[in-house]
């Protein structure tokens, strides 16, 4: 899976960081950084949770990447 | 499809005067039967799963200006125009634009910098009553706590804190169901606040500082920026959204710990638990019991129809205590690790998710860290008096507590 961020929607609430700090963090200027763009299945549940709780629905998962 | 109104659903009235414990018990019984209950002005959604789904459902919007209309605020009045610029009451493009601009100045890091000052505020309040060993926590600790912090965040001069408290007290009347009867007082306070903010905007335009107002003046995106009226409205919004909520949530947290001496001893012994303890306290006794939504289309829940045009209350209090998604939800447990996929609903969710959630967490963790380092024991010192029935925010009007000092 690949994580996609809609930068027009993201407003750095940081809920994804709480949900999965291995994958998401905020940089020094509070911009969202996806540390692991293609996380393994071990992180799937946490990533899906992060996608679900984003208030802006700015996160999505692309499944069919090569 | 059968309408929720024709079904035999449990009834909840905001005017019942039930204590929080009784209310929670009734909600628990109601959740066993289904996701819906009957409220004063529309259906209430009480199960965690349904609440989280509906928070992200585009067929529902925020309360819009309908609440202002119902509470008797005249269209076109200053109060009406300010509410039109409060994010919770806005939708669509206007909401998206304002939220984008404001959130730039309101990120986790921006509020994180307020920790030391927040700590000094609670320390000073506590210092004034500490030796007495007892106080009414509401006037002594809770009520005076949030406004200095908001003033520091926005960039309001410390010598205007008393004015801000006075204006906040009047402007908050605009959120009552009978706001129309207080219109003169609200309009007067709003006019005074606007005038003061005008002067401050002028000053910060010339000499920016490291504060929210300066950042809001500076934020610009694709040539878009906030107008003078919008800036005034944002400051009014911060007062409205950040005062009553935080002071009641602080009182609720103190109340919860006064009733749970073992957990108090634990958080004292392990300061690393403070962050988690705040999350649990916010879950256990939330200041916001319901998130208001308006159905733009017909919505079906549990096979029952919620007709288009209904006001829907998404009950964060009930959802936070729903054992079907959170095992052991009826236990106050500051060591809790909530299961993956579980969401705290006190701050709402979806596009109106509380923009001040990170600020609230900073305020509450600093308050708990300070109190738990000073009070060896904490207990109730008489009966707490809850806010009057019908209050939008859940909390206490009076909360007598007593403590023994830490060595």
Image: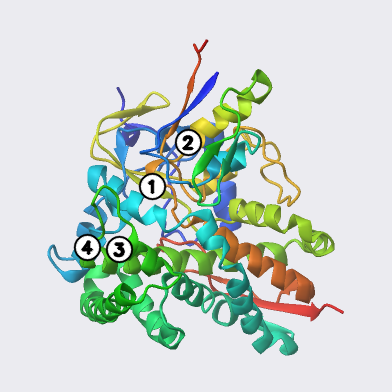
**Residue A37 in which image quadrant:** top right
**Spatial CA span between label 4 and label 2:** 35 Å
- Which residue does the numbered mark 1 point to in the structure image? B352
Q: Chain of mark 4?
A: B
Give the mark nearer the N terminus: 1 vs 2.
2
- Which residue does the numbered mark 3 point to in the structure image? B177
Q: Secondary structure at mark 2?
A: helix
- Which residue does the numbered mark 4 point to in the structure image? B227
Give the mark nearer the N terminus: 1 vs 4.
4
Q: Residue at x 20, y 64 (%)?
A: B80
Give the mark nearer the N terminus: 2 vs 3.
2
Q: Chain of mark 1?
A: B
On the same chain, marks 1 and 4? The answer is yes
**Spatial CA span between label 4 and label 3:** 30 Å
The colour scheme is rainbow
**Spatial CA span between label 2 and label 3:** 26 Å
Mark nearer the viewer, 4 or 3 = 4
**Residue B389 in which image quadrant:** bottom left
Crowd class of label 3 (few under 14; some 14 to 19; many from 20; radius 10 Å): some
Q: Residue at x 56, y 34 (%)?
A: B32
Q: Residue at x 43, y 26 (%)?
A: B302
Give the mark nearer the N terminus: 4 vs 3.
3
Tell which of B9 and B136 is nearer to you. Answer: B136
Mark nearer the viewer, 1 or 4 = 4
Give the mark nearer the N terminus: 1 vs 3.
3
**Spatial CA span between label 1 and label 2:** 13 Å
Crowd class of label 2 (few under 14; some 14 to 19; many from 20; radius 10 Å): many
Q: Is residue B18 visible?
A: no
Tell which of B258 and B157 is nearer to you. Answer: B157
Mark nearer the viewer, 4 or 2 = 4
């Amino acid at each position: 899976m690949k994580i996609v961020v809609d930068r027009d929607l993201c407003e750095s609430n940081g809920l994804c960081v709480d949900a999965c700090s291995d994958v998401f963090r905020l940089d020094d200027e509070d911009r969202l950084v996806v540390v692991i763009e293609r996380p393994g299945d071990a992180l799937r549940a946490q990533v899906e949770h992060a996608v679900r709780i984003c208030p802006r629905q700015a996160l999505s998962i692309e499944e069919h990447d090569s | 499809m059968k309408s929720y109104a024709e079904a035999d659903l449990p009834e909840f009235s905001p005017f019942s005067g039930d204590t929080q414990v009784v209310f929670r018990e009734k909600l628990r019984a109601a959740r066993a039967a289904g996701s819906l209950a009957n409220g004063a002005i529309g259906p209430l959604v009480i199960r965690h799963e349904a609440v989280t789904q509906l928070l992200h459902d585009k067929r529902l919007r925020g309360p819009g200006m309908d609440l202002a209309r119902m509470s008797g605020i005249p269209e076109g009045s200053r109060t009406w125009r300010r509410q039109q610029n409060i994010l919770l009451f806005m939708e669509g493009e206007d909401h998206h634009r304002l939220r984008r601009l404001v959130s730039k100045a309101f990120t986790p890091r921006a509020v994180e910098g307020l920790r030391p000052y927040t700590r000094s505020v609670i320390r000073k309040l506590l210092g004034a009553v500490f030796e007495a060993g007892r106080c009414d926590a509401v006037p002594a600790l809770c009520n005076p706590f949030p406004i200095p912090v908001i003033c520091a965040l926005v960039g309001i001069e410390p010598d205007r804190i008393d004015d801000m408290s006075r204006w906040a007290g009047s402007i908050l009347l605009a959120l009552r169901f009978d706001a129309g009867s207080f219109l003169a007082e609200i309009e007067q306070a709003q006019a005074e606040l606007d005038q003061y903010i005008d002067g401050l905007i002028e000053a910060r335009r010339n000499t920016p500082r490291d504060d929210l107002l300066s950042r809001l003046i500076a934020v610009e995106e694709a040539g878009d920026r906030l107008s003078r009226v919008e800036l005034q409205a944002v400051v009014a919004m911060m007062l409205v959204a950040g005062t009553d909520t935080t002071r009641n949530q602080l009182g609720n947290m103190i109340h919860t710990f006064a009733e749970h001496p073992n957990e108090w001893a634990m958080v004292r012994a392990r300061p690393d638990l403070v962050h988690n303890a705040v999350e649990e306290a916010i879950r256990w006794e939330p200041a916001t019991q319901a998130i208001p939504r308006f159905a733009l289309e017909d919505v079906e829940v549990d096979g029952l129809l919620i007709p288009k045009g209904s006001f829907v209350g998404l009950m964060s209090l009930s959802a936070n205590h729903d054992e079907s998604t959170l095992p052991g939800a009826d236990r106050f447990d500051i060591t809790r690790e909530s299961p993956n996929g579980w969401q705290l609903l006190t701050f709402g969710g979806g596009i109106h998710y509380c923009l001040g959630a990170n600020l609230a967490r900073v305020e509450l963790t600093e308050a708990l860290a300070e109190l738990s380092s000073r009070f060896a024991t904490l207990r109730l010192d008489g009966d707490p008096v809850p806010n009057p029935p019908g209050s939008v925010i859940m909390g206490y009007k009076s909360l007598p507590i007593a403590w023994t000092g830490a060595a």
